[in-house]
């Protein structure tokens, strides 16, 4: 995995470490009408659809910006003014979808579980049965706030059975965790270029049922975030409506080739699972504890409890690890003080073991000895 670089390893939820060849794919300038660019854009859209086994009934609509732009565009376009969402929440990204509904004045209800508890499928079924006004269910596949894997398959089946449409935020899962349109019925899946696909940041995309999107003309109150208009324009002449992120598309085209060479979703997912296993085993051996039991942990990012030792200061820990070449991430939980270490990006066993060595050296240097929180000690 390693190459000669002075960049730190990004053990975060993104942006992430990319391969040298993905970076090199950006070493040119392309005009927005350049034939090579239009072809790369077409290929990327097709390959993203294929990754979700969604070539038959869905289309892929890319959008400039980060993942949130695509989530917002999808909600604002697919849910009509008289629609109603049911949002499954167990972290910041579920809450963000509710906030988007507030901005767009879309009616919604929420079903919330604690940050370390998966979405409640029985409650989902009951709520859908009791409230015929609900048109869409919104969920987060891997809730990156904690690293928790939600029961997507059961959610999709329950939503389809109840005759409602499912919008999935698969931002930190797409490309690494299973998601096939033939097995997991969905109206829309949203993800971005810079997480498990290992491209660079700059675009989000939505894989959406063609018939659902076709019915959404005029729904979006936004000009730039109108997914229907973005789709129609791109279908028309192969070009983007507004200045395209040309370099991001070429980097993503290259990243998707490397993803395929590794064995696609299965290959990438297997590397991340191994990264996650090495990380959690090594950290637990040192005395750190994880927020989640292994059964709920997605192999994407791991939340560790903040050690109770008074000598542990997160900023100091972060800075010292950074100086050793590893960037980690603060916690985002409300239930517990924590920090996070990611398992995704162009990293493998060598980097995970080196990260563990760096953590070991750092806590020794800081004089931190008490690592497990009181309850678990
Ligand atoms: C599940 C999930 N949804 C949405 C987002 C938002 O993506 P972005 O920060 O690219 O806007 C993230 C970012 O980490 C995420 O993990």
Image (cartoon, helix red, strand yellow):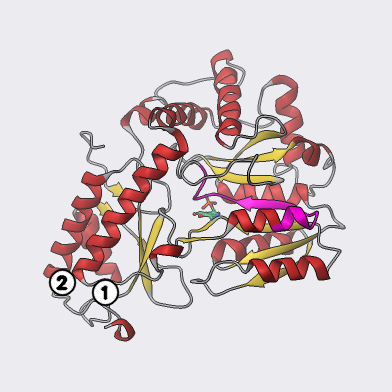
**34, above or below 352, in the image:** above
Considering only order in the chain, which callout, 1 or 2, is on the residue closer to the N terminus?
A: 1
Q: Are marks 2 and 1 in contact (CB under 8 Å)?
A: yes
For the record, the magenta segment spans 158-174
Place of residue 296 in the rendered image (x, y in percent of width and height, measured from the top left)? 46, 64
Q: Look at 74% across and 52% down and name the residue there.
A: 160
Foreground of the two, 10 or 60? 60
Q: Quadrant of residue 48?
A: top right
Q: Which residue is mark 1?
A: 313
Place of residue 98 in the rendered image (x, y in percent of width and height, measured from the top left)? 68, 64
Q: Which residue is mark 2?
A: 366
The tag on residue 36 is: none
Give the position of the N terminus as an image quadrant: top left
Task: Give the left or right position of residue 74, taking residue 47 as reference.
Answer: right
Q: Look at 42% across and 26% down and name the residue there.
A: 26
Q: CA distance from mark 2 to mark 1?
A: 9 Å
């Amino acid at each position: 995995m390693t190459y000669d670089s002075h960049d730190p390893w990004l053990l975060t939820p993104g942006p992430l470490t990319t391969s040298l060849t993905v970076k090199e794919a950006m070493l040119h300038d392309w005009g927005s009408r350049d034939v090579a660019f239009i072809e790369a854009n077409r290929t990327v859209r097709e390959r993203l659809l294929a990754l979700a086994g969604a070539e038959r009934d869905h289309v892929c609509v890319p959008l400039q910006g980060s993942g949130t732009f695509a989530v917002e565009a999808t909600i604002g376009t697919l849910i009509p003014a008289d629609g109603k969402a049911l949002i499954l929440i167990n972290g910041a990204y579920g809450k963000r979808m509710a906030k988007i509904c507030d901005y767009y004045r879309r009616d919604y209800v929420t079903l919330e579980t604690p940050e370390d508890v998966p979405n409640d499928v029985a409650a989902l079924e009951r709520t859908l049965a009791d409230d015929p006004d609900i048109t869409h269910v919104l969920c987060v596949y891997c809730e990156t706030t904690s690293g928790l894997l939600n029961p997507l398959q059961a959610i999709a089946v329950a939503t389809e059975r109840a005759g409602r449409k499912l919008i999935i935020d698969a931002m930190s899962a797409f490309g690494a965790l299973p998601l096939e349109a033939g097995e997991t019925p969905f109206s829309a899946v949203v993800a971005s270029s810079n997480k498990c696909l290992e491209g660079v940041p700059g675009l989000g995309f939505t894989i959406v049922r063609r018939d659902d999107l076709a019915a959404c003309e005029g729904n979006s109150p936004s000009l730039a975030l109108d997914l229907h208009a973005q789709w129609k324009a791109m279908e028309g002449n192969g070009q983007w409506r507004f200045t395209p992120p040309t370099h991001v598309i070429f980097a993503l085209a290259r990243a998707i080739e490397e993803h395929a060479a590794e064995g696609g979703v299965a290959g990438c997912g297997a590397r991340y699972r191994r990264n996650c296993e090495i990380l959690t085993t090594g950290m637990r051996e040192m005395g750190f504890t994880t927020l989640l039991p292994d059964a709920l942990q997605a192999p994407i990012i791991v939340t560790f409890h903040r050690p109770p030792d008074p000598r542990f200061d997160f900023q100091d820990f972060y800075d010292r690890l950074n100086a050793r070449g590893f960037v980690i991430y603060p916690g985002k939980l409300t239930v517990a003080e924590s920090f996070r270490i990611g398992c995704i990006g162009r990293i493998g066993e060598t980097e995970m073991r080196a990260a563990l060595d760096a953590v070991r050296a750092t806590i020794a240097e800081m004089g931190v000895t008490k690592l497990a929180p009181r309850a678990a000690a």
